[in-house]
Amino acid sequence: MEINQKQDAIEDKLDAVEKLLRKKKLFSYFKREVEDEIIKCILIKEKIDEKLHLLGKFAIITNDFTLDAVSIMRIYKTSGVVEH
């Protein structure tokens, strides 16, 4: 809101909005539209849904191609005991 209230040119305001979104790592989650000299940030629901779907998931990567998924998980789960 504060950016829209500035007396700067719309291009400068749009640059400021994009810079803020990039700084907060939100740039790809919003479409920017200019309407009547007002910048609107519209949430891209598909991007949010995709992020929520992957939240809390991670990949376990190994270069030992002889292991199956169960063995990799067993080794990973017991590695905490060794590290502790």
Image (tube, grey):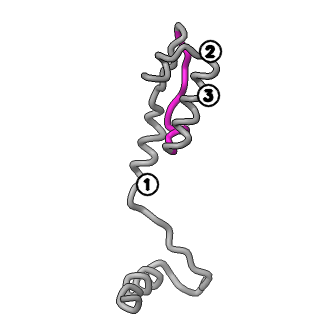
Q: Which residue is mark 3?
A: 15
| C-alpha distance separating marks 3 and 2 | 10 Å
Q: Which mark is residue 54?
A: 1
Mark 2 element type:
loop
Q: Nearer the viewer, residue 37 or 55?
A: 37
Image location (x, y in percent) of residue 29: 50, 37
Q: Nearer the viewer, residue 57 or 84?
A: 84
Provide the residue span drawn in magenta.
Answer: 25-35
Mark 1 element type:
helix
* Mark 1 residue type: Leu
Q: Is residue 36 left or right of residue 55?
A: right
Q: Are marks 3 and 1 in contact (CB under 8 Å)?
A: no
Q: Are marks 1 and 2 in contact (CB under 8 Å)?
A: no
Count every numbered label the image shows and give the total: 3
* Mark 3 residue type: Asp
In which image quadrant can residue 45 be found? Answer: top left
Q: Nearer the viewer, residue 62 or 84?
A: 84
Q: Earlier in the sequence, mark 3 or mark 2?
A: 2
Q: Is residue 47 above or below residue 64?
A: above
| C-alpha distance separating marks 1 and 2 | 39 Å
Q: Which residue is mark 2?
A: 9
Residue at (43% x, 54% y) in the render: 54
